[in-house]
Amino acid sequence: MVSTSVFGFVVAGSIASTMMFAKIAADHENRADFSSDMRNGMETLSFDVRNADAITNRTDTSFTLTFPTSGPVNYTYDNIGVITRTQDGQSRDVFRSVDEFDVLTSAADEPTGDVLNYDKDELSIETLSFSAGRGSSNMTRLKATNFSLSMRND
């Protein structure tokens, strides 16, 4: 009877540990996915900004980059969690699971006083945040705030 009770406690502890490790693994997988998406998306975005001639049509959720030898590139946030890159009629999702995307459209765009000043050759993004969950795991969040990308000055 005593050995059955001890065995029951060991089994219960093993099950609890396994469930805890599975949750931790799911959280780490979400964070790894976000990091990968962020890295790939930021690499594409920064490459485009560095090689663009001008940044035009700035809105809070989109902007257009023009290039000397190819068609313009438009980045658009669709308010359902996707930022899309469109060039020459071809679209590609560069960021997914986006909660918020806020492009500063002027130096005085932010009413809180936290203003990112930029010139015409910079793209300033106030907020880019992500969240998602897998299965029964809690939401994982990642947020990048107040960053600027500048064009190359050749």
Image (cartoon, helix red, strand yellow):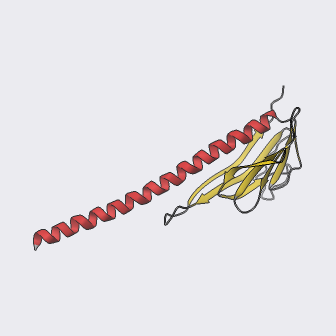
Q: Quadrant of residue 151?
A: top right
Q: In this view, does 6 lie above or below 97?
A: below
Q: Considering depth in this image, is 68 or 127 the residue closer to the camera?
A: 68
Q: In which quarter of the image is residue 22?
A: bottom left
Q: Quadrant of the N terminus?
A: bottom left
State how many labels appear.
Answer: 0
Kindly identify the residue that appears in the image at 74 percent across and 42 percent down: 45
Q: In which quarter of the image is the C terminus?
A: top right
Q: Going by the image, does 10 lie left or right of 132?
A: left
- Image x and y of residue 89, in percent: 83, 48
Q: In this view, does 55 lie above or below 28?
A: above
Q: Going by the image, does 87 lie left or right of 3?
A: right
Q: Considering depth in this image, is 54 or 73 the residue closer to the camera?
A: 73
Kindly identify the residue that appears in the image at 83 percent across and 36 percent down: 52
- Image x and y of residue 107, in percent: 85, 48
Q: Residue furthest bottom?
A: 1
Q: Which residue lies furthest to the top in this view?
A: 154
Kindly identify the residue that appears in the image at 71 percent across and 40 percent down: 44
Q: In this view, does 79 lie above or below 41?
A: below
- Image x and y of residue 24, in percent: 43, 56
Kindly identify the residue that appears in the image at 63 percent across and 42 percent down: 39
- Image x and y of residue 36, in percent: 59, 45
